[in-house]
């Protein structure tokens, strides 16, 4: 699991560790890891022209001490001071090994710019001098390595309300910060390299599944399993208006760990579903979970869906089904999967507000509806009512295609039917959906059905690496 902590959690862990170590130890650990990452990024240190953008705090200190290490290995290191004060000992050490203080004019000729403007102590946005220096690097195509976080982003929310660095690599220390996992800031980080500095950290604020977590969580069938014990999913989807949504959601569910699917809907749609997927049973009976909503259109029967929400079986609500969600009940087993526009309608806010503050609104909805909420997007944010948050950012942009949400709803429903919690079902569903999309797309266009068709192979590759 990739774990991200808040600034407050990092500060507390840092204070307790610093009390046991000689002064400056943590900064030296950070700077050592940073210098190695920069020379790996460049493929060399000797002869490289490195420009450090230095702000007033310890983030600049890290950059200066990394500059010392690079200068000792033959790099030409120039510090551009963007604040009236800079980390004094760090600057002295840099000058002592032949580094120099320069001006923004040095940026255009640099091989790399190191962003030590602000770290976890920074407020969002950049001051004019810093913004101008960053713009110079961008306009001359000089790659930027961010120290700890891309300066200007909001570290604890992933929001980017003002100008900020867009890094080609971010080197962070001790743990990931929330901005590394949550968009729009996550997209400004580039790859994130974590340097261990020995922090002892509490329960993470935000998590992100890795391949090994998928292996640990996936309900792999065993010798005693039969189609009922693997889980039966009830699918209430599609309408004469949108029959395709039922076919696609079914394809998504069949790509999950499901034993059987019972389809509930108009006869004409049931016939189409069966024609595409002869495995489907259109007979009512017991199910372990419900997937409700994809393409329901005018077929949505709110009282009927509310009855399902009140029953014991977990329910995934997607698309039109979301209209049945109210904030009066206990929806512990409910997983809602809105996109930004749908979440905006549920919360009575503008879509752009949800897009700019994704973590905040996913959390708000989880709390208000007492349900697990999966907010779809380039980075998927999943918030549970108990405060757990998971994110998934490994999807190809080609996945933004009609019907992809129906595949996801079916797939998450399959995980719910297999007995996973709403949080685990949503996290596994989002992860495998993205993995299948990456496999099917291979950097080219995809259809929802091709994503569903790639689910078995994507799952096999993850389970048997
Ligand atoms: N914690 C750890 O475990 C470890 C932390 N380490 C490192 O320390 C970093 C945190 O250092 P930090 O606390 O000194 O804060 P940091 O972000 O450098 O600067 C804050 C100062 O900048 C200013 N300022 C604020 N906003 C601004 C803006 N938008 N634009 C411009 N300036 C702005 C403001 O000062 P002002 O100029 O307003 O007086 C504020 O005081 C951390 O990210 C990591 O790199 C590692 O060394 C080892 C282990
Ligand atoms: K930075």
Image: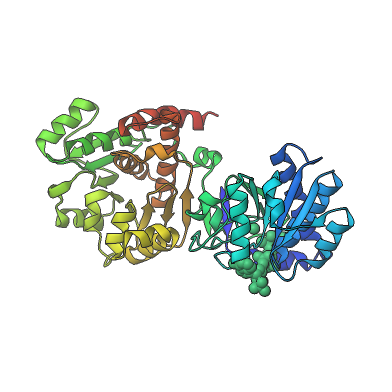
**Quadrant assignment, res 359:** bottom left
Left or right of 97, for residue 221? left
Depicted 421 relative to depicted 450: above or below = below
Q: Which of 229 and 310 lies nearest the eye of the viewer?
A: 310
Q: Which of 139 and 148 lies nearest the eye of the viewer?
A: 139
Residue 122 visible at all: no
Q: Which of 277 and 394 lies nearest the eye of the viewer?
A: 394
Residue 104 visible at all: yes
Count of labels in the image: 0
Taking the image as four quarters, which one is ligand 2 found in? bottom right
Depicted 209 relative to depicted 87: above or below = above
Identify the residue shown where x is 30% and y is 55%. 341
Q: Position of residue 112 (x, y in %)?
A: 69, 46
Residue at the far front: name it.
105
Q: Position of residue 269 (x, y in %)?
A: 14, 35
**Quadrant assignment, res 74:** top right
Depicted 311 relative to depicted 228: above or below = below
Depicted 46 relative to depicted 272: above or below = below
Identify the residue shown where x is 32% and y is 59%. 351
Q: Which of 47 and 301 lies nearest the eye of the viewer?
A: 47
Q: Position of residue 247 (x, y in %)?
A: 23, 34
Dividing the image into 4 quarters, which one contains the C terminus? top right
Left or right of 46, for residue 142? left
């Amino acid at each position: 699991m990739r774990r991200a902590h808040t600034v407050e959690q990092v500060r507390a862990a840092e204070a307790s560790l610093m009390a046991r170590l000689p002064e400056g130890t943590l900064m030296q650990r950070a700077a050592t890891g940073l210098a190695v990452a920069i020379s790996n990024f460049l493929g060399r240190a000797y002869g490289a022209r490195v420009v450090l953008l230095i702000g007033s705090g310890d983030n600049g200190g890290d950059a200066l001490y990394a500059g010392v290490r690079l200068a000792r290995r033959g790099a030409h290191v120039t510090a551009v001071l963007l604040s009236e004060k800079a980390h004094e000992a760090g600057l002295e050490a840099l000058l002592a090994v032949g580094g120099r203080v320069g001006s923004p004019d040095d940026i255009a000729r640099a091989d790399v710019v190191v962003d030590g403007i602000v770290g976890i102590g920074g407020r969002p946005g950049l001051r004019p001098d810093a913004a101008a220096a960053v713009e110079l690097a961008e306009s001359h195509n000089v790659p930027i390595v961010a120290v700890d976080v891309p300066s200007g982003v909001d570290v604890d929310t992933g929001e980017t309300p003002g100008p900020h660095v867009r890094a080609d690599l971010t080197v962070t220390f001790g743990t990931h910060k929330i901005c590394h996992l949550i968009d729009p800031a996550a997209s400004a980080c580039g790859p994130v390299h974590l340097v261990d500095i020995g922090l002892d950290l509490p329960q993470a604020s935000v998590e992100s599944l890795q391949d090994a977590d998928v292996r640990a969580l996936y309900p792999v069938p065993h010798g005693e399993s039969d189609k009922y014990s693997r889980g039966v999913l009830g699918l209430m989807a599609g309408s004469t208006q949108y029959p395709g949504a039922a076919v696609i959601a079914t394809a998504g569910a069949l790509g999950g760990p499901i034993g059987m699917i019972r389809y509930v809907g108009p006869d004409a749609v049931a016939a189409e579903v069966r024609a595409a997927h002869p495995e489907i049973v259109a007979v009512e009976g017991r199910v372990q979970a419900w997937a409700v909503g994809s393409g329901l259109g005018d077929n949505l029967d709110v009282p009927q869906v509310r009855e399902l929400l009140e029953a014991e079986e977990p329910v995934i609500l997607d698309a039109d089904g979301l209209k049945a969600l109210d904030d009066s009940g206990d929806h512990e087993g409910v997983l809602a999967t809105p996109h930004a526009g749908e979440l905006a309608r549920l919360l009575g806010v503008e879509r752009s507000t949800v897009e700019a503050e994704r973590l905040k609104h996913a959390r708000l909805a989880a709390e208000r509806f007492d349900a697990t909420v999966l907010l779809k997007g380039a980075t998927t944010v999943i918030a549970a009512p108990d405060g757990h948050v998971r994110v998934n950012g490994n999807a190809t942009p080609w996945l933004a295609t009609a019907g992809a949400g129906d595949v996801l709803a079916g797939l998450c429903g399959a995980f719910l039917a297999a007995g996973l919690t709403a949080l685990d079902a949503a996290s596994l569903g989002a992860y495998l959906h993205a993995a299948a999309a990456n496999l099917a797309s291979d950097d080219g266009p995809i259809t929802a059905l091709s994503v569903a068709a790639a689910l078995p192979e994507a799952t096999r590759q993850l389970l048997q690496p």
